[in-house]
Image: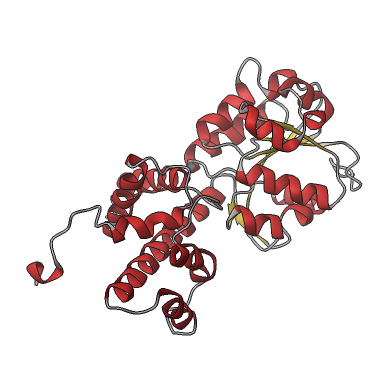
Amino acid sequence: MTLFPKNLTKPIGVVGLGLMGQSLIKRLDDANLDVLGFDINPQQIEKLGQHRVTSLAKMASSCDKILLAVFNTAQVQETLFAADGVLAHAKDPLVVICTSTCDPGEIKQIAEDVEKAGHHFFELPISGTSMQLARGDCLGLMGGSPLLCEQLSDLLDVITPHRQYIGPAGDASKAKLAINLVLGLHRAALAEGLNFGVKLGLDPEKLLQTLQNSAAASSVMKIKGPLMVARTYDKPQSKIGQSLKDFGLIADLADHAGLMLPLAEIYIKLLQSQLQDGHGEMDNAMIYEAIYHNRLNNKPLKDGL
């Protein structure tokens, strides 16, 4: 006998109605599932519609599965364990599915605490932009009990048809951060290559097409390249502030492991320059502008040769 019915009759709760939360809701809506949402930001609530907005207390009593799409680990902790949080109001066992990118050690402890409280925790960070999640062509990274993974398969099919089981809770966050490290450096490399070609007099759109047909091609070019070429970043799929948060986690974990990440250090400085300029809510393709405007004020390459 499984813990969770196959027919998903109860509403699915979504906490955090930002870019990823809205895309999760689109996936659930497309599958004709009932959805209840919560966010502390009134503007995000308006996007969902007041008739589907509820409190954490009512969500805990109405739903048996709750998706977390909050900003960071601290917000996961608060959503679950605060005096007015989800678990304080849950009368029956809940399944908490965390899609946020979190500190692996802290999320492992949260998972253990949720289980001790008589509930279930499943880790599902998403590799891909909010647009990719909405289309269903992202990769879900699964962490937690293999049995729970199987029992949630119907819901997981709706959220992310493409997914991979990584290991116990915490391991999916480790994999997500490793992926984000590579993706961030890909974005920086693309931004640098486009800037280089443009400064040499090449047409940026034609250069992007050439890069996409070359040995240097990557999925980053397809998603972020057009934004860099158009130099428009005000309809974000993933934001500067979010990337900086993730790279802060990456830097802390690398430092703890005694690992040097020289390229990541430069990338963090480029992100910080954009945040300082007030662009934290812009798409992270805006790394192009940090290089274009020489925000690190580096000396010319020949001075170091």
Please say if 218 is above or below 44. below
In the drawing, does residue 247 fall left or right of residue 99?
Answer: left
Q: Name the residue at 39% across, 78% down.
A: 203
Please say if 68 is above or below 287. above
Image quarter of residue 88 = top right
In the drawing, does residue 86 fall left or right of residue 267?
Answer: right
Total marks placed? 0
> In what quadrant of the picture does the C terminus appear?
bottom left
Name the image colouring: secondary structure
Please say if 255 is above or below 260. above
Question: Viewer-proximal residue, 132 or 227?
Answer: 227
Question: Viewer-proximal residue, 259 or 100?
Answer: 100
**Which residue in the rendered view is the most extreme toward the top?**
83
> In what quadrant of the picture does the N terminus appear?
top right
Image quarter of residue 116 = top right
Rendering coords of residue 240 (x, y %): 44, 47
Residue 263 in sight here: yes
Rendering coords of residue 142 (x, y %): 64, 52
Rendering coords of residue 151 (x, y %): 80, 49
Q: Name the residue at 48% across, 57% down.
A: 232
In the drawing, does residue 187 fall left or right of residue 64?
Answer: left
Residue 66 in sight here: no
Q: Name the residue at 45% across, 58% down.
A: 285
Rendering coords of residue 283 (x, y %): 48, 52
